[in-house]
Image (tube, rainbow, N blue to C red):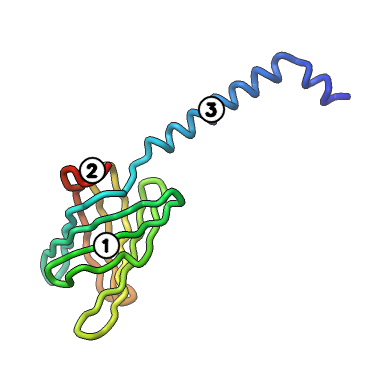
């Protein structure tokens, strides 16, 4: 009986309408979130020097990430996995260094045109700063 009275009130429907509008607004905000899909020119700044990499990243609807990384030092390597949540990213790959497989992870944040973060390899024994810019015509 109490629910029936509530459902008959115009205020109840006004509140539902407002909730619906705020839900649309939240969806619009998520649509405006940066998308990592594209080509990136990335700089690795480490104790061993500065290295250049090119990333070709595909961000899927579920937030998972695939793609490839290419550098003069390591050649082309597939991104083995990763994720994007909001403006934060994590990428994982396995590289061959002198006959040994080495796990490499990248984590950081990005905007529509730039990224910053950290590279971590060999279980955190090696770390370096990461920065990058989206290549002209290289994605969203």
Which residue is labeled 2 in the image?
A: 113
Which residue is labeled 3 in the image?
A: 22
Q: Is residue 29 above or below residue 21?
A: below
Disc on the earlier residue, 2 or 3: 3
The residue located at (75%, 15%) in the rendering is 9
Q: Which disc, if any, is residue 68?
A: 1
Q: Mark 2 to mark 1: distance in Å?
A: 18 Å
Position of the C terminus by quadrant: top left
Q: Which disc, if any, is residue 44?
A: none
- The reply to whether dot 2 and dot 1 touch (C-beta < 8 Å) is no
Q: Is residue 8 above or below residue 40?
A: above
Q: Mark 2 to mark 3: distance in Å?
A: 28 Å
Q: 12 and 94: which one is in front? A: 94
Q: Secondary structure at mark 3?
A: helix
Q: Secondary structure at mark 1?
A: strand
x and y percentages locating residue 105 in the rendered image: 32, 66
Q: Secondary structure at mark 2?
A: loop
Side of 35 where 137 appears, left or right: left
């Amino acid at each position: 009986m109490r629910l029936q009275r509530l459902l008959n009130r115009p205020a109840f429907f006004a509140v539902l309408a407002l909730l619906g509008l705020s839900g649309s607004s939240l969806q619009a905000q998520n649509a405006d979130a940066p998308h990592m899909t594209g080509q990136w020119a990335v700089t690795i700044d480490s104790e061993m020097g500065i290295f250049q990499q090119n990333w070709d990243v595909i961000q899927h609807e579920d937030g998972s990430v695939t793609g490839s990384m290419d550098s003069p030092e390591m050649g082309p390597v597939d991104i083995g996995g990763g994720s994007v949540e909001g403006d934060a990213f994590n990428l994982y790959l396995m590289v061959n260094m002198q006959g040994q497989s080495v796990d490499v992870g990248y984590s950081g944040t990005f905007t529509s045109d730039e990224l910053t973060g950290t590279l971590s390899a060999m279980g955190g024994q090696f770390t370096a700063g990461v920065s990058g810019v989206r290549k002209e015509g290289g994605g969203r």
